[in-house]
Image: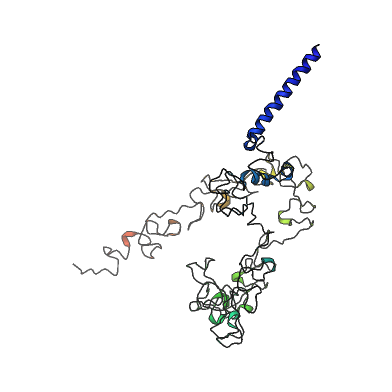
């Protein structure tokens, strides 16, 4: 009984549904309705079927949704495009109709290099056009793209004008030192150094102004100031020795002295007494050979293990001795046993010092006379009154000048008589009998009759 009731209810709904559908069809309602705005075949925003939309790429589906249909009757102005109704795919004049579209996206592939075009509009596609930017040519011809072919040779130098780097100046050789496309015969800056020929101290050799820029306000290099730029001067330093023979071409040295005979003159030799080094003192400096006994790529003068191969120079304890030759690679060495590791000790072999001080390592900073100057630099280490010099009288003897005559007592035979440093045969050092004293009656120079 229950089954019969359920079946009866089902039939009632079925017939009711069919009746309503018939009414809608007869009234034309389905003609203007869209059941699925994205996938229905009657979608006003897409001309594709469901099957076509499934194979469309993302940009194509976007384009379908945004492009107005050519049978859209709802748009005032015809088919919704700027073109004619019979050309619904004509591109609109602006892209404002595509809201939200990435401005770099271009469905017409205007910038796609794979699309063959006719850039110059001469009716020949670029792929077949020898001059794609020249509408008057499809091949370069005699004068090349962009130029009208002509055999005119105004200057009569044998090179037609369109190929002549100086069409109005005869130059059969077409010389162009700076390769700027302007022949030397008509180039106002032949060497291209930014200095006009009329002002250039090396017209045919680039000699730019100091400062490295053609716009520099500096001067063109001319070391000897002879008006010929260094770039073209065969005697740059002006010592009358040609550069090719000069052992110091940039430093005047007419004598060409070369003490160590290494080919570099003394005035420009960084190591004038080291024949193995001239222009570079190297890593070790003048007088020290750049040897590498262990062939580890590190010269001996800076190698922390000069006799043991250790290119890495690993020094785990930082004591200046590489692990390869360090008996205790993880314990800092202390050669003099003063408690300061050698790597931090200014005098690693002097247990009394960790810094050289005034006297240097191995020499005590003793100051015997306690005058503040250590004995190693004190001219009189036992005389506190003298430090830098022993004076006239020597160490231990004061430079006293009792009579203030400018002669210290130690060499003044008459230390109490400023008029004498040696005694007189008659009066000795007695100032009362000084012959130069006008009051002395024994002075033969004195006039007794003088009132």
Quadrant occupied by the C terminus = bottom left
Q: From what the image shows, is residue 58 above or below residue 189?
A: above
- Image-quadrant location for residue 448: bottom left
Q: Is residue 52 left or right of residue 419?
A: right
Number of on-image labels = 0
- Viewer-nearest residue: 83 or 356: 83
Picture coordinates of residue 404 (x, y %)?
37, 56
Relative to 235, is 9 above or below?
Answer: above
Q: Residue at x 45, y 54 (%)?
A: 399
- Locate residue 33 relative to residue 408 in the image: left or right: right
Give me the residue at 40% from left, 55% from top: 401
Residue 253 in view (yes/no): no
Residue 147 place in picture, x, y as percent: 59, 76
Q: Residue furthest left?
A: 451
Residue 135 at x, y = what percent?
A: 60, 71
Horizontally, residue 45 falls left or right of residue 386, namely: right
């Amino acid at each position: 009984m229950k089954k019969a009731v359920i079946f009866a209810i089902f039939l009632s709904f079925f017939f009711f549904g069919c009746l309503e559908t018939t009414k809608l069809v007869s009234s034309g309602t389905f003609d203007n309705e869209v059941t699925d705005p994205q996938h229905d075949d009657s979608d006003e925003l897409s001309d594709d079927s469901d099957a076509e939309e499934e194979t469309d790429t993302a940009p194509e589906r976007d384009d379908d949704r945004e492009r107005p249909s050519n049978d859209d009757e709802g748009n005032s102005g015809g088919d919704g495009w700027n073109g004619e109704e019979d050309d619904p795919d004509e591109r609109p004049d602006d892209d404002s109709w595509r809201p939200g579209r990435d401005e770099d996206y271009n469905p017409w592939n205007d910038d796609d290099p794979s699309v063959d075009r006719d850039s110059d509009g001469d009716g020949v596609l670029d792929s077949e056009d020898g001059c794609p930017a020249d509408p008057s040519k499809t091949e370069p011809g005699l004068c090349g793209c962009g130029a009208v072919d002509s055999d005119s040779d105004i200057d009569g130098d044998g090179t037609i004008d369109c190929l002549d780097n100086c069409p109005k100046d005869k130059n059969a050789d077409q010389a162009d030192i700076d390769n700027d496309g302007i022949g030397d015969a008509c180039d106002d800056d032949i060497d291209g150094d930014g200095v006009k020929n009329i002002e250039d101290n090396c017209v045919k050799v680039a000699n730019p102004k100091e400062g490295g820029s053609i716009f520099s306000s500096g001067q063109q290099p001319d070391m000897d100031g002879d008006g010929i730029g260094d770039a073209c001067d065969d005697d740059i330093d002006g010592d009358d020795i040609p550069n090719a023979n000069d052992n110091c071409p940039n430093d005047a040295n007419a004598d060409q002295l070369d003490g160590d005979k290494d080919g570099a003159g003394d005035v420009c030799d960084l190591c004038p007494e080291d024949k193995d080094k001239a222009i570079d003192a190297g890593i070790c400096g003048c007088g020290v050979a750049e040897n590498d006994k262990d062939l580890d790529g590190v010269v001996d003068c800076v190698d922390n293990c000069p006799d043991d191969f250790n290119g890495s120079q690993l020094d785990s304890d930082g004591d200046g001795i590489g692990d390869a030759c360090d008996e205790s690679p993880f314990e800092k060495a202390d050669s003099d046993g003063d408690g300061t590791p050698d790597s931090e000790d200014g005098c690693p072999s002097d247990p009394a010092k960790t810094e050289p001080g005034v006297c240097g390592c191995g020499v005590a900073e003793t100051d015997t006379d306690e005058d503040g100057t250590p004995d190693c630099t004190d001219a009189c280490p036992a005389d506190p009154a003298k430090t830098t010099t022993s004076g006239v009288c020597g160490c231990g003897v004061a430079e006293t000048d009792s009579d203030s005559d400018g002669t210290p007592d130690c060499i003044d035979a008459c230390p109490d008589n400023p008029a004498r440093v040696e005694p007189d045969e008659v009066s000795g050092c007695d100032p009362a009998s000084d012959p130069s004293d006008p009051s002395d009656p024994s002075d033969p120079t004195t006039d007794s009759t003088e009132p």
